[in-house]
């Protein structure tokens, strides 16, 4: 357990020590020790609050062909859609009435949404809801594009790095994409003053303890304000259709580790966790997470934004079930709050 004590004491490890640490993921005593420290740190910086983000999945068109993704460009079986500015604003109006004070606009890398169109959307949302934070999650762009969106009013940006290992990145993505470009985008976003989110899938094909150790090293180096991780879940129309899903238990272990590495981080209990385990979100909060992201997308579109199979998209995980979700959060000792929930660093 020396490596666990060192992590708690120093807040980081050497790569070989991360590998040793990950071997404790099934050790009940180690899991509990890390959970206790993760929850202590979460409460130290954020109290017992859980921040709610309203997720709006506004386009499922994507120019990329990531091998794990159900909405990849070459999947001809997807029923594609795009939301208009007016539809996005309608989602925000519903969410604002429900108490949301952060909206997350997420979509594939859709060339239809030019810088001009996205600037118009960002400005419209910020004008209508000036007390709200706006997060974008729309993939890799140029420094200039990120700058324009920041000036238009975007506050945060989510861009999972997926893996910090070059060989593993190649296993998951086509040759047209590169880890160098992905990392460049993350550092560009940091330099422009966004609250930046990185992250990865747990159990993605080809992932090893060594590649996970590199992910933890990279997160410590990048020092993002947000980290999104969730178990890999296969999609039936991808080359990874028959691959096993990632482990809920390892995901929870890593949530605790990431909270200790980055004590002030905004850390979601993701939809993927809730998809594989009906109590996955609550377990994520008990492991150190402090954010949940109910779905504000139009009901008729949620099923079409299917990144992986069996994604939960109706019921209490969606925005209209916010009272039920809030009650479930309260039952485990925390309080769902309608606040912007900015990074406290």
Image (tube, rainbow, N blue to C red):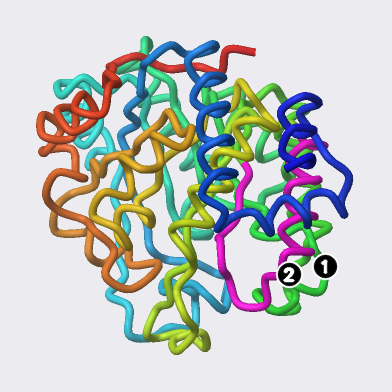
Q: Position of residue 344 (x, y in %)?
A: 57, 12
Circles 1 and 2: CB atoms closer than 8 Å:
yes
* Residue 199 within the magenta-colored segment of the rendering: yes
Task: Please provide the residue range marked out in magenta.
Answer: 198-222
Q: Quadrant of the C terminus?
A: top right
Which residue in the structure is indicated by mark 1? Answer: 166
Q: Is residue 126 shown left or right of residue 73?
A: left
Point 59% across, 52% down: residue: 139
Q: Position of residue 269 (x, y in %)?
A: 40, 41
Residue 45 occupies quadrant: top right
Residue at 33% over, 67% down: 306
Element type at marker 1?
A: helix
Residue 76, image quadrant: bottom left
Asked whether 118 falls inside the magenta stretch, the response is no
Position of 180 with respect to 329 (left or right) is right
Q: Position of residue 330 (x, y in %)?
A: 21, 24
- The residue depicted at 56 percent of the width and 19 percent of the height is 41
Q: How many marks?
A: 2
Residue highlighted by disc 2: 169
């Amino acid at each position: 357990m020396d490596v666990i004590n060192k992590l708690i004491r120093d807040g980081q490890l050497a790569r070989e020590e991360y590998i040793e640490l990950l071997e404790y993921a099934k050790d009940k005593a180690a899991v509990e020790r890390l959970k206790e420290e993760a929850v202590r740190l979460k409460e130290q910086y954020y109290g017992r609050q859980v921040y709610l983000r309203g997720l709006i999945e506004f386009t499922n068109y994507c120019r990329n062909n990531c091998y794990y993704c159900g909405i990849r460009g070459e999947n001809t079986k997807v029923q594609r859609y795009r939301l208009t500015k007016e539809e996005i604003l309608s989602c925000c109006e519903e969410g604002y009435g429900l108490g949301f004070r952060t909206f997350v606009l997420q979509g594939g890398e859709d060339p239809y949404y030019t810088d001009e169109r996205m600037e118009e959307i960002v400005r419209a949302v910020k004008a209508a809801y000036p007390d709200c934070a706006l997060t974008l999650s729309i993939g890799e762009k140029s420094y200039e594009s990120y700058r324009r969106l920041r000036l238009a009013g975007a506050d945060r940006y989510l861009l999972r790095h997926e893996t910090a290992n070059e060989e593993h990145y190649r296993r998951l993505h086509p040759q047209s994409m590169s880890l160098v470009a992905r990392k460049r985008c993350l550092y560009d976003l940091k330099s422009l003053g966004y609250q930046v989110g990185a992250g990865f899938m747990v159990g993605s094909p080809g992932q090893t303890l060594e590649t996970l150790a590199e992910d933890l090293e990279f997160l410590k180096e990048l020092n993002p304000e947000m980290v999104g991780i969730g178990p890999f879940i296969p999609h039936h129309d991808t080359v990874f259709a028959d691959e096993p899903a990632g482990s809920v238990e390892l995901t929870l272990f890593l949530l605790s580790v990431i909270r200790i590495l980055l004590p002030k981080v905004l850390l979601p209990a993701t939809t993927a966790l809730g998809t594989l385990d009906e109590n996955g979100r609550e377990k994520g909060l008990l492991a150190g997470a402090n954010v949940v992201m109910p779905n504000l997308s139009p009901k008729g579109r949620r099923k079409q934004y299917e990144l992986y199979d069996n994604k939960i998209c109706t019921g209490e995980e969606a925005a209209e079930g916010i009272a039920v979700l809030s009650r479930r959060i309260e039952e485990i000792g925390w309080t769902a709050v309608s606040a912007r929930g900015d990074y406290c660093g």
